[in-house]
Image: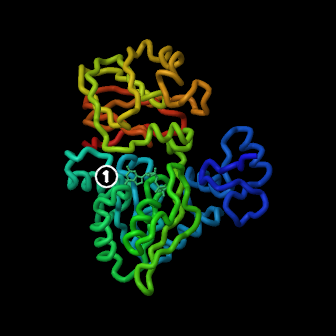
Amino acid sequence: GEPVLCIGCGARIQMADKTQPGYTPKSALEKGLETGELYCQRCFRLRHYNEIVPVGLTDDDFLRLLTQIRDANALIVYVVDIFDFNGSVIPGLHRFVGDNPILLVGNKEDLLPSSLKRSKLKDWLRQRANEQGIRPIDVSLLSAKTNHSVDQFLTKVDKYREGRDVYIVGVTNVGKSTLINQIIRQKTGEKEVITTSRFPGTTLDRIEIPLDEDHVLVDTPGIIHQSQMAHFLSGKDLKIVSPQKQIKPKVYQLNDQQTIFLAGVARFDYISGERHGFTVYVENNLPLHRTKLVNADAFYDKHVGDLLTPPDSAENNLPPLTRHEFKITEKSDLVFEGLGWISVPADTVVAGYAPEGVGVVVRKAMI
Ligand code: GDP
C-alpha cells in the first residue's frame, strides 16, 4: 500500500533502524495512526522539547545542534519569515549562541507591500529580535524565492564571518532550504540540491557547503515550531492559506460587535470601540466573510467547509477554534501565526480565534 509518512518531516515511517529518518517505535506508530498525528520519533521529540526549556534533554539531534553552535566559532545566520515572525522564533536561541555574532535574515520580503520602507522594516525586525534577547550585528531583508537581495546578503556573510564557518539556523518553513539552494546555485551553478516543500522539516541532516578551502556553511536541521499552522492543515489547504505573492491589504470599516472570518481557519471579533478601519494582511485569495458577532457561532457551524474553506470539508482534522481576547492600547497587529495579521487601532477590545495550538498574539504594528 501507500507508504506511511511522518507529518513532521515527510520521512517514510519505519521501525527497523533507530538511526535512520522516519524511525518510530511500534507503540507510537499505533497511537499515531489512531489519532491521525503520526510523527517519527525524531520529530516527536523535537516538537516536545520545543515546548519546554531546551536544556538538559536527551534528544540526540537537538542537543548536538545546540552544542555544535555553542562550541563553534562561527557566524550564525538566523533566518526568519517576515510574514510569520512569531512562528519563526527559536525559543532560547540567545542562550546557546554563546559569543557568536548573529546575522538576522528576514526572508520572504517579496510578500510585503513594496510601499513599506525597507529601513523601517529592518528596524522593526531588530526590535522584535531584541525582545527575544537577541542582538544581531546586522539585518538582511531578502527573498530566497526571487533571489532579491541575496547578493547583498552574501556580501554581508563574507564581511562578518571573518574567516570562520557559518551556521544557518531557523525553524521549519521559513525558507531556509530555498535560501541555501540559492547560495549553492550562486556558488556552484547547480540547481535544486535540497528538496524544498511547504511541509515543515524537509531538511533531515546537517549539510555542508564549502565557502573556501577551510570553511563551510552548515545547514542545520529546521527546528519544528509546535504552533505552526502548517501542522494542522492538509497540503492542499496549506497551499491556499500560505501567501504566494505580494500581499494586497484589505481594509474593513467595522462597527463594534462585528466579526470577520478568515476562511474557516480563523476568526476576528471587534468587541468594543469606535467605528474604525481594520486592515487584513493574509493570502490574497483567502475568502473573508463579515457577519454580526451575535450570528457568528451559528454562521461558522453552518458554513465551515463550504463558504468558509479551507478547511476543505466540515469533517476535517482542524482542532476547534480557540478564543483569545485583547485590550488594545496602541496601534497593534493581531497575529494569527502562519496565516497573517489584522492591524488594530488603539482603544479597542478585540478577540482572535485560531485552531487550538496555533498562536494568536498581539505585537507592535509592523505597518
Ligand atoms: P525550510 O523548511 O525553512 O527549509 O523552508 P523551505 O525552503 O522548504 O520553504 C518553505 C516554503 O516557503 C516553500 O513553500 C517555499 O516555496 C516558500 N518560500 C521560501 N522562500 C520564500 C520567499 O522568499 N518568498 C516566498 N514568497 N516564499 C518562500
* Circle 1 Cα neighbour tier, 10 Å, few/some/many (<14 / 14–19 / ≥20): many
Whether residue 98 is visible: no
**Residue at the disc numbered 1:** 109
Q: Is residue 288 above or below residue 166?
A: above
Q: Is residue 90 above or below residue 65?
A: above
| Towards the viewer: 144 or 192 | 192
Q: Please, what is the three-letter code of the amino acid marked with disc 1? A: Glu
x, y percent for residue 215: 44, 82
Whether residue 165 is visible: yes
Task: Single out the residue that lies furthest toward the bottom.
Answer: 213
Query: Quadrant of residue 100 in the image?
Result: bottom left
Q: Is residue 255 above or below residue 352?
A: above
Q: In the shown orientation, is residue 44 left or right of residue 187?
A: right
x, y percent for residue 298: 50, 14
Instruction: Check the picture and name the quadrant holding the C terminus.
Output: top left
Circle 1: element type = helix
Q: Is mark 1 within 8 Å of ligand 1?
A: yes
x, y percent for residue 146: 34, 56
Residue shown at 47% from the left, 16% from the top: 299
Coloring applied to the structure: rainbow
Query: Quadrant of residue 362 in the image?
Result: top left
Q: Is residue 266 above or below residue 335?
A: above
| Towards the viewer: 174 or 283 | 283
x, y percent for residue 234: 56, 39
Q: Give the total number of marks visible in the rendering.
A: 1
Query: Quadrant of residue 142 in the image?
Result: bottom left
Residue shown at 48% from the left, 31% from the top: 265
Residue shown at 60% from the left, 54% from the top: 9
